């Protein structure tokens, strides 16, 4: 199995209710992919950060294997969420993939 973990920081101009709405949109969009993409075992998005955090959103996902992760990255439903709910609102992205 392969873990795929991403940390994002949101763009600085997103504040208040708009910032929270963007975080909710990312969470709902990505978590809705569960059961829709081959090889995706689990997907969770954490948006409730402690004040000590230097990231705003965390994706924690699990795939059957590396081929499944690669398929996810180009799957049309994932690409639609990434292009519509994530990329327009994020300033930085850090990713770590590893075998479990």
Image (cartoon, rainbow, N blue to C red):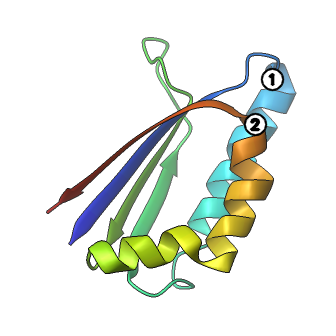
In the orientation shown, which residue stands out farthest toward the left?
Answer: 100
Compare marks 1 and 2 and give the one earlier in the sequence: 1
Camera-side residue of 64 and 27: 64
In the orientation shown, which residue stands out farthest toward the top?
Answer: 52
Camera-side residue of 39 and 44: 39
How packed is label 1: few (under 14 Cα within 10 Å), some, or many (20 or more)? Answer: some
Residue 45 % position (x, y): 51, 51
Rendered residue at 45%/64% (across/down)? 43
* Label 1 SS: loop
Q: Locate the C terminus by quadrant.
A: bottom left
Can you identify the residue that label 2 sits on?
89
How packed is label 2: few (under 14 Cα within 10 Å), some, or many (20 or more)? Answer: many
State the count of labels. 2
Q: Is residue 9 left or right of residue 10?
A: left
Q: Is residue 17 left or right of residue 41?
A: right
| Circle number at residue 31 | none
Rendered residue at 46%/57% (across/down)? 44
Residue 79 % position (x, y): 67, 67
Q: Using the rendered view, name the quadrant where residue 94 is placed.
A: top left
Rendered residue at 44%/44% (across/down)? 6
| Circle number at residue 14 | 1
Q: Are marks 1 and 2 in contact (CB under 8 Å)?
A: yes
Rendered residue at 46%/20% (across/down)? 50
Residue 76 % position (x, y): 68, 78
Q: Is residue 64 left or right of residue 44?
A: left
* Label 2 SS: helix
Q: Locate the N terminus by quadrant.
A: bottom left
Residue 5 vertical position relative to residue 7 in the rendered view, above or below: below
């Amino acid at each position: 199995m392969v873990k795929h973990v991403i940390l994002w920081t949101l763009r600085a101009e997103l504040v208040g209710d708009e910032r929270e709405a963007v975080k909710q949109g990312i969470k709902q969009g990505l978590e809705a992919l569960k059961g829709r993409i081959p090889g995706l075992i689990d997907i969770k998005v954490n948006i409730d950060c402690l004040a000590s955090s230097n990231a705003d959103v965390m994706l924690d996902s699990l795939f059957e294997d590396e081929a499944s992760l690669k398929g996810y990255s180009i799957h049309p439903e994932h690409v639609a969420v990434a292009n519509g709910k994530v990329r327009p609102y994020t300033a930085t992205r850090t990713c770590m993939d590893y075998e479990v």
